[in-house]
Amino acid sequence: MVEAGYTIEGGRRAMSELIRHRGDLPSAAFAVCDEVAFGALMALKEHGLSCPEDISIIGIDDHPMSWVLGLTTIAQPVADEAAFAASLLLDRLQKPDDAGAAGSHQLSTALVDRTTTSSYRA
């Protein structure tokens, strides 16, 4: 695991660190968001490596640029998540003594398989 933050530059630095200092290359990298995955793709190119031939990469969010770059990603309804969080916050502000009312909720996600992942290579 390498700290990358949530930026393209952070993803580039983190993947470069993996490539330079961590010995054997992993077969895959899971980025905390698509922007970090974009940076990881940049680092692979800078180091003469390719995706998915050398390392598979997957992100989270399904950023609009993910399609352009062929990034495999986990799509999530970001606008729905934000609206739901705002609704929970407003409910909490209006009823501060009702701490247990939020409960548990799930929103849908989906794997969007594009070109940055391949089958496991031993």
Image: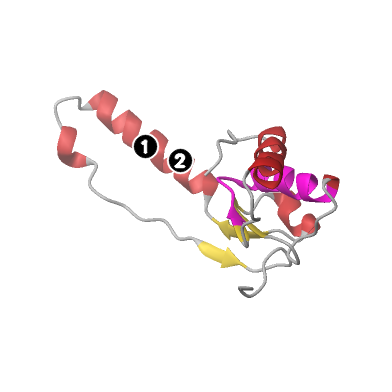
> Residue 68 lies in magenta, yes or no?
no
| Alpha carbons under labels 1 and 2: distance apart | 6 Å
Q: Which mark is residue 100?
A: none
Looking at the image, is 46 positioned above or below residue 97? Answer: below
> Residue 38 lies in magenta, yes or no?
yes
The stretch of residues the image draws in magenta is 29-45
Q: Is residue 95 left or right of residue 58?
A: left
Q: Amino acid at mark 2?
A: Ala
| Element at label 2 | helix
Q: Amino acid at mark 1?
A: Ser
Identify the residue at image location x=19%, y=40%.
101
Instruction: Specify the farthest residue to the front.
Output: 23
> Which residue in the protein does label 2 denote?
83
> Which residue in the protein does label 1 denote?
87
Circle 2 residues within 10 Å: few <14, some 14–19, many ≥20: few
Q: Are marks 1 and 2 in contact (CB under 8 Å)?
A: yes
